[in-house]
Structure formats: C-alpha cells, structure tokens
Amino acid sequence: AQKPKPAPKPKPAPKPKPLQKPKPAQKRRDVVKTGQSGDSWLLGFLGNAVQRFGIPVLVGVGIYEIGRRLFLSHDDGWHSFDKDVQKQLYLASCRAIESRRMDRLFYDPIAAVITTRRALRLAEKENSLAQTEYCLRERFIDDFVRSTLKKSEEIKQVISIGCALNTRLFRIAIGRDDVKFFEVDKPNVIEYRKKILNKVSGALETKMKSSELVGADVGVVGWDSELIVQGLDWNQKSLWIVDDPTELSESRFEVLFRTIGLLSTQDSIMVLGLSNCTEENFSTKVNLVAKCGYQVHGSTFVGEGKSGYGRWVGDPSNSCVLKISQISKKPAAVLSEGRFSVFSEHSDAEDEPKFSALEFSAVGDTGEEPQDFGGAEQSVVRLELQV
C-alpha cells in the first residue's frame, strides 16, 4: 500500500505593503511667485481659464485686446489734451462733418485735417441739434465778415477773439490782400494751433496778407500787450470777432470789452457770437456791452429769418449774433511825433470799476509790471511806447 502524500504546507500570507506617505499637493500654476513677470502670470492665468471654461474665454480676451490696441492706435493722444483743446477739437469735428454734407453751410476741408479721430467719432456719435446751431452761427458770421470787408475798404485789420482752431481765415474769400488778421486765444490752444497748422501748411491757401497768432488770457488786464507787439495799429479801423465768450465771468467780460475799446477807432465794428443765449443771459450780455460803452445795432438768433439757411425749422434757437459799435468817444493825445499815444476813458459812474494801475506796454520784452499810481483811480489810462 502506498503511503499517503503529506498535506501541502499552506503558503505564507503575503506581507502587507507599508503605507505610502501621501504626495504633497501640487502647486497651482496660476499662483504668482516671487519675481515672476506679469506676462508669465497672465499666460498661466489664461491657460487655467481655458482649461476650466474653454475656448470662448480665450476668444473673448483676444477680441478685447485687439479692440484696446485699435482704440489706442486711433486715439491720437486725445486724453493727453486739456479740456480747452478737447473742446476746440470737437468743434473742428463739427465743421468737418458739416463740410461732408451735400447741403453744407460752408466748406472747411482743413477742419478734418486738424482734428483727431477720437474727436471726430464723438461728434459723429452725438450729431445733436447744438451742432447745427453752431454751424449756422459760423455761417452767419462768415457772411457778415465777408460782406463787411467787401463794403468797407477802410478796414485793414481783423481781430478774432477766441479763434481757437477755427479756420475762418482760410474758408472765406474776400478778394483782398491788404487785410491783416490777428487770432487770439488761450496760450495752450494757440500752441496746439501753431503745431498742427505747421503740419498741414501745404494744404493752406491764405486768402489774406498775414495772420498773427497771439496767446493771451483775454480776461486779465494787460492781455493786449502781445497783440500790440504783433503789429496791431489802433489808429486803423478794425473788425473785431468775439466768438462765444460764455466762459468769461462778468468782470473778465468787462476787462475784455474795455480793452477792445482802448484799441479801436470810433468807427470800428464788432460782431459777437453767443451760445446758450436764454432771455436772461441775453439781457445780461447786452447790459454788459452797454456798460462798457458800446451800442448793439442788431441781434439775430440762429434760425430767425434768412439765418436759418433752409436748415432750421421752428422757433429760433438759443444761439445769436450781435452787431456792435462804440458810442463813447475817447480823447487822444499824440506826443513826440506820434511815438507816444495816450488814450484815457474817464468814468464818473459809481458802479463802474475803478482802475488804480497805469499799464505800460512796450514793443519787446521789458519785463515791466503794472505799477500803482494812486491818483489814477478815476480813469482808465493806457500808455504805449513804440521804439
């Protein structure tokens, strides 16, 4: 008999594997590390955003970046300009838009050259009734200046106050080359005007003998010194264009008009354009003009009669134009063969401002400041030295 086989020995149980230590959590790639550049962080952030939310996020970010770059490339430095220059660029855009119309009130091709794309887009987007009022007022003043210079050959100089970036000089044709044009505005606006007109000088066809650009704050006593240095002759009959001085306070408005009176002959003419001319504002301006020794010969509200030029329907607008002349005669004395000219305007009215300074202006840079002469408080006196 065979011996029984021994029972197989049981296999030893497998040894349990030692417990593994958990691996440390991986750092997120979108965590900003010390010294990591902004571009690397942005790429990491976009990568995580795409993984979580898909391609639409990447497409949206790309569209935004493209739009931002296009905006900056077409901005032309709009945000670097101060508010005065921005306002005048906007008005230049209004004239450029008007020049594109088939029924345009005037043709001003230079306006489109001197403005910026940003200002042009703002004007195109708004396209308001105020733009039409402004263009109608510009056309009316253009016609007035053109007809006045054609009828009165005695006028040898035109002074535009608040000319800003207005190119009226280049868009009116009067057929005369004996008229000198002075254009006055704030120094920062004149500086930009000189800069931009130098760039487009090849496109300009001057219709007059010359144009002098004068940077001055017309609301401050003595603003006319630079105007005289540039060659203004107060013995010549002049045409003054004062374009919308609505930003001037009553006292500054008075300084402007009294100074113009000292620089003008008795038969000089002035045209005053006003915007936002409500009944109250209109009365205030007319009273101020009369207080300074002027007479309003006529007022025309834009849209009234022929001033609508077929573009205005309904009641007249709040934009108006005044024709003004002087009524106060100033005594004049010429000394030393005309080298010194003294003009004085005496006032006994209690409500009129009293000037306690004798202003001294000279051709050239003297650096002299107005000096106090206590005995002159009852009169306005200007002494001009020409050398």
Image (cartoon, helix red, strand yellow):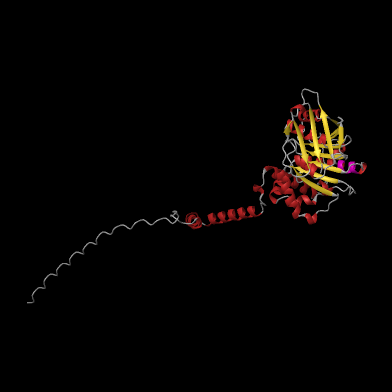
* Outermost residue to the front: 336
Instruction: Tell me if residue 244 can be seen.
Output: no
Residue at the image point whose x is 85% and y is 46% from the top: 180
Residue 67 visible here: yes
Looking at the image, how many numbered discs can be counted on the residues?
Answer: 0
Name the side, left or right, on which 71 lies relative to 143.
left
The question of residue 237 being in magenta is answered with no
Magenta segment boundaries in residue numbering: 144-149
Task: Measuring from the top left, give residue 328's x and y in whole percent.
Answer: 86, 29
Furthest residue in direction bottom, as rendered: 1
Q: Relative to residue 31, is residue 233 depicted above or below?
A: above
Measured as percent of width and height from the top left, residue 81 is found at 67, 46
Q: Quarter of the image for the C terminus: give it.
A: top right
Q: Residue at x 40, y 56 (%)?
A: 27
In the image, 348 versus 68, the foreground residue is 348
Q: Residue at x 78, y 51 (%)?
A: 110
| Of the pair 176 and 2, the residue shown nearer to us | 176
Q: How far from the left and from the top, in percent, is residue 324?
A: 85, 34
Q: Main secondary structure of the magenta part?
A: helix
Q: Residue at x 49, y 58 (%)?
A: 40
Does 146 appear in magenta?
A: yes
Residue 241 image offset from top left, x and y in percent: 82, 40
**Dividing the image into 4 quarters, which one contains the N terminus?**
bottom left
The one of 44 and 51 positioned closer to us in this rendering: 44
| Residue situated furthest top in the rendering | 350
